[in-house]
Image: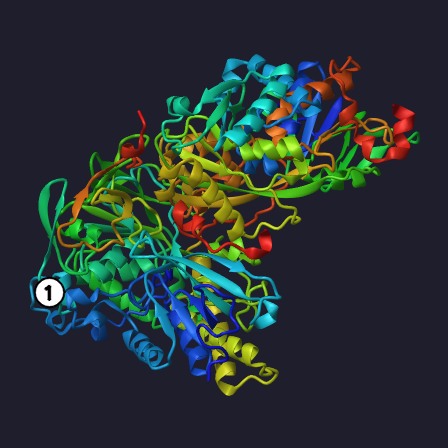
Amino acid sequence: MPLSTPNDPGAPAGRTESYDLVVVGAGPAGLAGAVAAAERGLSVALLDGDAQLGGQFYRHPAPGLGAAAPEALHHGWAAFDALRRRWEGSGGVHLPQHHVWTVAGERAATPGAGADGASWVVHAVTGPDGDDERSVAVRGRAVLLATGAAERHLPFPGWTLPGVIGAGGAQAMLKSGLVLPGGRVVVAGSGPLLLAVASSMVTAGARVPALVEASGYLGYARRPDVLATGPGKLVEAAGLVTRLLGRGARPYPRHAVVRAHGTERVEAVTVARLDGDWRPVPGTERRVPCDAVAVGHGLVPRIDLATALGCETRRTVDGAVALVVDPAQRTSVPGLWSAGETAGVGGALLAMTEGELAGTAVAARLRGVSVARPSARTRSLLRTRARLRAFADLMAAAHRPGDGWPAWLDDDTEVCRCEEVTAGRIGEAVEDLGAGDARTVKLLTRAGMGWCQGRVCGPAVACLATRGGRGAEQRPLPASPERRSPAVPVRLSTLAALDPDPGED
Amino acid sequence: MPTRHPTAASDVIVVGAGMIGAACAYYASRAGLSVTVLDRGPVAGGTTGAGEGNLLVSDKEPGPELDLALLSHRLWLELAPALRAEAEFEPKGGLVVASDETRLDALRRFAKAQGDAGVVTVEIPGDRLHDLEPRLAEGLAGAFHYPQDAQVQPALAASHLLRAAGARLRLGEEVTALLTGPDGAVRGVRTANGSRLHAPRVVNAAGTWGGAFARLAGTELPVLPRRGFVLVTEPLPRLVRHKVYAADYVADVASDSAALQTSAVVEGTPAGPVLIGATRERVGFDRTPSTEALRRLALGAARLFPVLAGVRVMRAYAGFRPYLPDHLPAIGPDPRVPGLLHACGHEGAGIGLAPATGLLVSRFLTGTAPGLDIRPFRPERFSPELLGETA
Amino acid sequence: MTRNIPYTVRLQPGENMPRRLGRSTDPRPPAPLSLVDARPGPPVEFTFDGRALTALPGQSLAAALWAAGITSWRTTRGGGRPRGAFCGIGQCFDCLITVNGRPNRRACLVPAAPGDVVTTQEGHGRAALDPQ
């Protein structure tokens, strides 16, 4: 029996449906959490911007495309399929195409207050891109934020040319739309995702003339200690490389794409060898013709909803900002749980592990069950999590961007794609005006003030901002996570039509 | 570029690298003093970076704050044109609209009094409103145009004033103690990294944290935060030309300035987004989003400019206005700590009032006559037992 | 909301290759459609800047435009430079496009619908609001 049913009479009046648990994000972490909670008797709403379950990792073609074998583009599809079936039998409510823009805390006095006295209203806009007229609010006694990750980008001259796309973006477009950005796709950047992307591109029929990896390519795979902790069969990556080579993909370890050429779209790239700090080594440049570039430097957690609520964060090994969670996946804000990439990027298996831990913990909390003696299953999940987190940290360290990457920027390289702010202008703000952090650079240059609100340029701007300049002889400025609210754009009319708060008059 | 002599003494240390601190540094430097500016965070990291950059006379009733605003208005126009351009100074003018005849009458009386105090006001009849603001809602009774109202981009204004001041800038460095001599007079400050910076005068320009700094300095100033939210829309063509707000806001000002709550104030920016302010709440330093504040702002803005209903809000953020109980800033020397001056508590008007504040502070520092009745701004006015001694 | 791009690479080539690919004698790599054994429904017809195009049912506008060899459908506000899809997951807003007169739609998220009139978005896409 759910502890409270949707629309229970105890809930405040209005159109807001109430659940025990509201899960934001239907990827591996959110889905696993929703399943665990629903199977333990909680009423669960699972919100996601996409039309289908799966998140980015298990992104798959729309039903209209009639893909009989979506697993051909996926790894571990069976695990997802099993989880999806369990969810469908759990009685939980899936709210697809719901883009959550804010999570608002309610007063502890609210009837039906949930875990730790908190109660939450999760606000979403609807439609494929959140532009439909209808907006929705659901109330939860607990909230699980499983908002995943986004790709980290380091700008380079020409990266704004059409045809230069995110490596994850190329993968996503292929997984959902069954399309390629061109016939010859240079895959570049850093991180294990690149291998998967190159493999997908080749499998789907593209040529990969260059596979460019800034770190020591597969260096970690040669370390037996790392391999021993590795969750997957990393050694098979070597087999993959061999196969990519067979398809004409040329690997460029310790190289970077330092320039994209073209006028209306990308026609070629310059690849250069990097020194240990990722500075291009003069004289090593070579030009590689291509139709597209799929580029990315690993992933960074997406935690806008959490930081807006003041959740505590930590700096990860590779310089990203992730949420601090306890062994039960609780954030520092009572009543808010988080699982998966938000707590530190670590892959789908870790996300599912954490999701299950979170769903189990929420159920125990709301049902008042003591967790002093965790079950055998929980203990096993905790061990898996520890092992995968350790492995993720090793991977993150191996692919941490080198300090010298800004050497491949020109003064006129656009760093902020939305507001077209160049590296030169950011340099002026840092050198002449005393900006020493991303927020101040933003205030002085508009870098990060456009449509994406710095979600793309933020990590790069933060690097550029802390490199020196006026006042730099002092100790480093305290880093605080950027608060970005709303998490997605919302129409003014949607805000104007929110239910009035009677307590505010 | 500023000179860098971390250990050298200066004539004055300004604590706070926001707009007020920048203006204090600028005018002190122009008066021939050597200045060091310290901030525990970055430039414009507090209220300055969270505001819209209002230089307003329109919302002020006749009195000491309006006098300060009018002086500031003149000073903005006296700044070098290059500096004004870098601060994105826009003499856009304000438009205060009245929805009905009753409100228009109240606005007329208010504007008349302002006019007597030196504010330029022009009544715009309801049928001419669209000449000034083509996208304004239909059916409004009328408005008053305030050509002296202007806008700057506050973070740019503060950082370029600081650069023009040529002050030594020490960022990310928190003051941990005020250094005083045996007579209790200021000798400088100690900072978190152990540095001892010497100066016979210290200016508290710590904004919302000015009360905390006053306590650190062994005195008292009841500065409290008053939260405000601002909505930022997607980039748009210039469909809002002035700073536009409803007369209810003014009526509130005229009757009881403490009762201001949530009149929407709408304006365009050179970069494209429309900014919508301004709520006022006393909730401490809580930045978590308030959907009720967003609802009220959105509703108010869409009533003034129905065309905005369909555009999207990209960002909503909170800032904290530093306010004092009588809603006037504290400007001037603190008789309790010789050598300490205050320049904080400007609530939502700090960007506009900064030049006048900086000029007054520089006159105190140099012993020049302030040229304005400064009694309403005395920092010790909240400690009645002290007023007798210094009145 | 979930953005779980794969991180840990656990490639198992034999297991994940479609049967057809397993044959090393096949000289042509398969197109993405045959890879997942797709049998799409009837195509969706729409126009882009007046040009008649088709999308497979369920494909995003960005995917349909890519399939037609089109990689840019927006010009920037400042420099008037061409842009198209970048992040592919709705995060970067680079792929903004005007659909049936409504600007600022994310082409990587919005599916093509029959009869859609899709146009390149110039700058902010809100010229219609300009009072001048």
**Residue A156 at least partly seen:** yes
* Foreground of the two, A502 or A328: A502
Which of B180/B152 is in front?
B152
Location of residue A192 (image quadrant): bottom left
In percent of width and height, residue B340 lies at: 80, 29
Q: Quadrant of residue C76?
A: top left
- Whether residue A277 is visible here, answered yes or no, is no
Chain letter, disc 1 residue = C
* A429 lies above or below A212: above
Above-or-below relation of A311 to B298: below
Q: Position of residue B77 (x, y in %)?
A: 56, 14
**Residue furthest to the front:** B101
Q: Residue furthest bottom?
A: A376
Between B352 and A393, the one nearer to me in the picture: B352
Residue at which label 1 appears = C41
Q: Position of residue A194 (x, y in %)?
A: 31, 57
User: How many numbered circles does the render carry?
Assistant: 1
Q: Is residue A147 left or right of residue B66?
A: left
> Regarding mark 1 in the picture, which secondary structure is present there?
loop
Q: The residue under label 1 is which amino acid type?
A: Gly
The x, y position of residue B60, in whole percent, is 62, 26
Q: Residues within 10 Å of mark 1 (few under 14, many from 20)?
A: few
Seen from the viewer's position, the closer of residues A126 and A397 is A126
In this picture, residue B154 sits left or right of residue B113: left
